[in-house]
Amino acid sequence: MTLKGKRIAILAENNYQEMELWVPYYRLKEEGAEVKIVGAGGAKAYTSKHGYPVNVDVQADAVSAADFDAVVVPGGYAPDIMRRHEAMVRLVREAAQKGKTVAAICHAGWMLASAGVIKGKRVTSFFSIKDDMINAGGKWVDEEVVIDGNLITSRTPADLPAFCREIVNAVAHERKLAKTA
């Protein structure tokens, strides 16, 4: 239970990729984190690309980066809808600016681009948004997981084991530093 006492937000919107939301959700809970599903625009639940529902714990406009130790953005087509909500973009931007772990997989790079947090950073994503990542100032590479400062990015559901491992490591390390400070 390396993440006991840690609070992690997982963002949700319609058309999310099931595994990219649920695998981190259960993996982080398994480590003892309190995981909250944060919704974009007032809905009580969202459906995945294949119709699988996720219930929202709190709306983005009711929270701030200070409420969480990390923010996880799943992919699918949801990030394109998420970035239309300023409260979602602000949450990601503030978390990144405050040095909190921000993790994005697959198409979730769109949220990082809209939040303006990837300029000069090494990042990866699903290959079809490579140009978006580069145009936002990122240094795109084709690797299963890329860590640059407090940003963690991955490409596809096949990368979930490495993605989740690095989220746990990053949040646990931050906790360890906080205890010694």
Image (cartoon, rainbow, N blue to C red):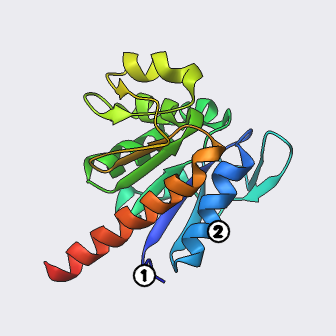
Q: Where is residue 118 in the image (x, y as percent from the top left)?
A: 33, 32
Q: Which of marks 2 and 1 is in front?
A: 2
Depth check, front residue: 151 or 110: 151
Q: How far across and how far down the image is residue 104, in percent?
A: 49, 44
Left or right: residue 37 compared with residue 9: right
Q: Residue 50: percent from the left, percent from the top?
A: 85, 42
Residue nearer the viewer, 55 or 174: 174
Task: Determine whether label 2 and label 1 are within 8 Å by CB.
Answer: no
Which quarter of the rendered picture does the C terminus lie within?
A: bottom left
Can residue 62 be seen here? The reply is yes
The percent coordinates of residue 73 (x first, y second) are 54, 47
Extreme-right residue of the structure: 51
Q: What element carries label 2?
A: helix
**Residue at left offset 45%, top offset 33%:** 124
Amino acid on which disc 2 is placed: Tyr
Q: How many residues crowd around disc 2 within 10 Å: few (fewer than 14), some, or many (20 or more)? A: few
Amino acid tagged 1: Gly
The image quarter containing residue 108 is top right
Dot 1 lies on which element?
loop
Residue 155 sits above or below residue 95 on the image: above
Residue placed furthest toward the left = 181
Residue 6's quadrant in the figure?
A: bottom left
Q: Badge 2 is on which residue?
A: 26
Q: Upstream in the sequence, badge 2 or badge 1?
A: 1
| Residue 67 in the figure: left or right of residue 149 | right
Read off the residue under disc 1.
Answer: 5
Q: Which residue is drawn at 56% across and 24% down?
A: 127
86 or 30, nearer to the observer: 30
Q: Which residue is drawn at 66% across and 37% down?
A: 78
Q: Distance between the residues labelled 2 and 1?
A: 16 Å
- Confirm whether residue 40 shows in the render: no
